[in-house]
Amino acid sequence: MPKWKVFVTRIIPDEGLNLILENCDAEVWQEETPPPKEIIIEKIKDCEGILTLLTDKIDAEIMDKAPKLRIISNYAVGYDNIDVKSATQRGIMVTNTPGVLTETTADLAFALILATARRIVEADKFTRSGKWKSWGPMLFLGRDVYGATLGIIGLGRIGQAVARRAKGFNMKVIYYSRKRKEEVERELGVEYRELHSLLREADIVSIHTPLTEETYHLIGEKELSLMKPTAILINTARGAVVDQKALYKALKERRIFGAGLDVYEKEPIDADDPLLELDNVVLLPHIGSASVETRGRMARMAADNLLAGLRGEKPPNLVNPEVLEAE
């Protein structure tokens, strides 16, 4: 029996990759950088499945060049890199890897909170450069996290996980979400606020909302102007939820205390991006889910989704179930 032909757009952990190689006629892109669009088109023209990353933009044009394509398995929770509507119209299943990276991403969000508030990266550079000559009462004064007010934008799985961590720091937790979650409020002891109220009240604002048409530039110049001059903005969700130019201006002018970012409007961030010049922002290379354990589980989940779709079964994490109803 011939094996399904698939294309994997990057080397992923063995937990998933070996499963795919055992069951499929698979080609794996070996480069560290994403395959260009023309390469993806060439590689999947005869494929029944493709395993993609967030950096791979899969649009209608690519799908039309792959008449045999049945499933796109995305190695991520978000799937804004895929034109899901076009996939559904063409009878192509789209899957993701939800839940598995919740705790790891929440860990990183809290790491950014602490690093930004206590100026950890800045102080590390200072120490390594040999500039530290003496203990001083005014040296690298930061902001207290314990007892502070944390404002969470987007109270989904990751937002809730961050709220649980905040309780260990005796923080008051307020949140804004498109829909109020009264059951979660009772469970976690968090309080709902409208967005403008949250921004005014919070000492630390942490973003955990998906990128949609409604959340694009949700935090812009107007919203940043509502924040306290002592406040901190954390983003581990999607870069375009924040207007990056407006954020740079607010940080440059010290209208907020600092920011901690794992995501950007353009990834990777340009080498001449003005954010790189600032000392009041912590910049990470999109490593929210980057633990050995989590990335391995993501790989297995993405492989399971891919193989289920190829077998004609409903994948465990199908984001467009209507594609099956249309059959």
Image (cartoon, grey):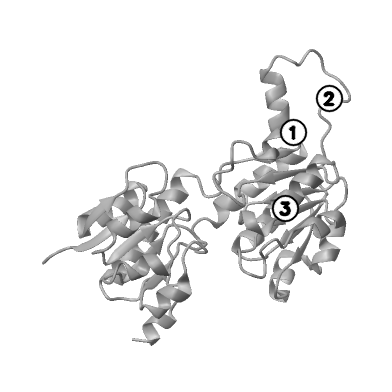
Give the residue at x 34% y 70%: 64
Determine the residue positioned at 30% across, 64% down: 49
Badge 1 crowding class, 10 Å Cα cut-off, few under 14, some 14 to 19, many 20 or more, is some
Residue at 72% across, 53% down: 166
Q: Are marks 3 and 1 in contact (CB under 8 Å)?
A: no
Label located before the other in sequence (2 or 1): 2
Q: Quadrant of residue 125?
A: top right
Q: Characterize the local packing of mark 3: few (<14), some (14-19) or many (20 or more) Cα atoms within 10 angstroms.
A: many
State which quarter of the image contains the N terminus: bottom left
Indicate the amino acid at tag 3: Ala
**Image coords of residue 5 (percent x, y):** 22, 62
Left of 267 or right of it: where is 227?
A: right
The label on residue 139 is 2
The answer, for residue 16, to whether it is visible in the render is yes
Instruction: Work out whether residue 277 or residue 305 is closer to the camera in this orientation and state it.
Output: 277
How far apart, in angstroms, are the residues tagged by discs 3 and 1? Answer: 25 Å
Residue tagged by mark 1? 279
Residue, disc 3: 166
Amino acid type, residue under disc 2 in the picture:
Leu
